[in-house]
Amino acid sequence: MMSLQIWILIAAICFIGELITAGFFILWFGVGASVAAVLSYLGFSETTQFIAFILVSIILLALSRPFAKKITQGMPTKKAASDRLIGEKGVVIEDISLKNGGVVRISGDTWRAISDQEIKEGTSILVEKIEGVKLIVKPAA
């Protein structure tokens, strides 16, 4: 049985989730759960509460998508600072060993780096990808 407290809990979870994600997606399910909570308080059947929850959520979601798309259209996609390093060249400032990795400098910043081969200090490198906070590098061609 869907009681008032369950609908309030669902709404609260959705609203908190929206604060964390900020995508205007979960918000509408929170509004739908709030409407269902009001209907539960007024004594409507569980079927009516559930249908209202689904309908309100879907209608608000459908109405907000074009608006969200319109206001985000043309905005540049942003990469994380570290993602911008992929494909960049740098130089080894501390030998990179297979066991311990090493240190590289790219655009004035110092990064821990690992490689599938040993690379000596002073060698130019190319960033292939990023794992956690370490760069995966190879010698630049």
Image (cartoon, helix red, strand yellow):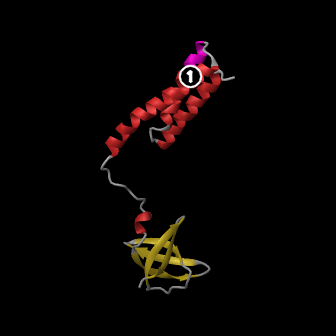
Provide residue 22's location: percent of width, then percent of height: 45, 41
Q: Is residue 127 magenta?
A: no
> Looking at this view, is 29 or 108 the one in front?
29
Residue type at numbered disc 1: Ala
> Which segment is the magenta one?
36-42
Q: In this rendering, is residue 51 above or below 105?
A: above
Give residue 31's position: percent from left, percent from top: 50, 27
As drawn, is 1 to the left or to the right of 126?
A: right
The residue identified by callout 1 is 36
Which residue ends up furthest to the left in the rendered image? 74
Q: Name the quadrant containing residue 106.
A: bottom left
Residue 31 shows in the view: no
| Residue at 36% over, 55% down | 77
Please give the name of the residue rendered at 54% of the width and 34% of the height, measured from the top-left corner.
14
> In this rendering, does residue 55 appear at all?
yes
Q: Residue furthest top?
A: 42
Q: Please identify the quadrant where the C terminus is shown.
A: bottom left
Whether residue 41 is in magenta: the answer is: yes
In this rendered view, identify the residue nearer to me: 52 or 36: 52
Q: Quadrant of residue 10?
A: top right
